Amino acid sequence: MVQVEGTAIKRLEARIEPLLKKLETHPLYKSVQNMEHLRVLMENHVFAVWDFMALLKELQCGLTCINVPWRPVGKKDSRRLINEIVLAEESDQIGGRNISHLELYLESMAACGANTEPLQKLLESFSRQKTVDISDAALQKLFAECGVPEPARGFVRSTFDAVRTGKLHVVASAFTFGREDLIPLMFTGLLKDMNKEIGGALDTFIVYLERHIEVDGDEHGPMSLQMVSEICGDENDPKWDEAVIAAEKALKARIQLWDGVVAEINKIKA
């Protein structure tokens, strides 16, 4: 296992600890009481599954060589980490087949009767663009055209704000601290209980959640911390201050996403 030490990384973790605790105890996890509530969650959360790849691909571009002719670039451990995560996210081996985690998530949504159309429309819109425009104005226009749920819109905009900075340490911090396994094991347990009652419709979703817990465990978490340390550099480098801000923004965006989902669920309950 990779061991990461240093006062800068500890300061960062101390700064975001209150936000992590807020996420761990978020009312969302008790709000999801039936399939209708779960569909609301999935129809928003799928956009977080998708835009995670924006951070990952930005890191892959910055930490590895994606050009011809190829040449070894970047830190060896960070290069390995990013390529491992890309492999798992784009073509994981699950149930005897190769599949991306987004495709797996979409399958789980279909099994639950959740609406995948807004994301599918968004992906099709990007596919039709000869030159992809990820400006905030362009994204907002696409969100409206594709019917992206309101809670997801703010979250995706925050992600692409980080990407557009062009600062690798900002992207790495948002990736590492904003996208760790933020769904508590307790919630997975509740879903398993619900799944028994409804005849296994959540099987694929539970596989998705458990797979993420597995791959984010012993290696990827510590390696991500090492990546942030390598990119930010010396303990007194100003990059660390920006990394703290990026981590806080990413976690606040996740809290706002969950807040929005709870608000939508409460409308159903009313």
Image (tube, helix red, strand yellow):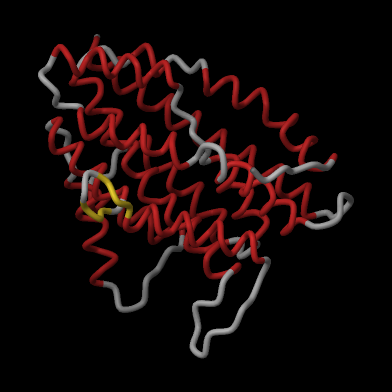
Residue depicted at x 29% and y 73%: 129
| Above/below status of 112 relative to 99 | above
26, 191: nearer the viewer: 191
Q: In which quadrant of the rendered image does the C terminus lie?
A: top left
- Report x, y in % for residue 158: 51, 47
- Report x, y in % for residue 233: 80, 57
Q: In which quadrant of the rendered image does the N terminus lie?
A: top right
| Above/below status of 197 relative to 80 | above
| Above/below status of 138 relative to 196 | below
The picture quadrant where one finds residue 59 is bottom right
Task: Name the side, left or right, on which 162 lies relative to 241.
Answer: left
- Report x, y in % for residue 186: 42, 16
- Report x, y in % for residue 72: 61, 78
Residue depicted at x 44% and y 50%: 52
The picture quadrant where one finds residue 86 is bottom left
The picture quadrant where one finds residue 114 is top left
157, 26: nearer the viewer: 26
Q: How many marks?
A: 0
Task: Name the side, left or right, on which 196 lies relative to 152.
Answer: left
| Above/below status of 71 relative to 174 | below
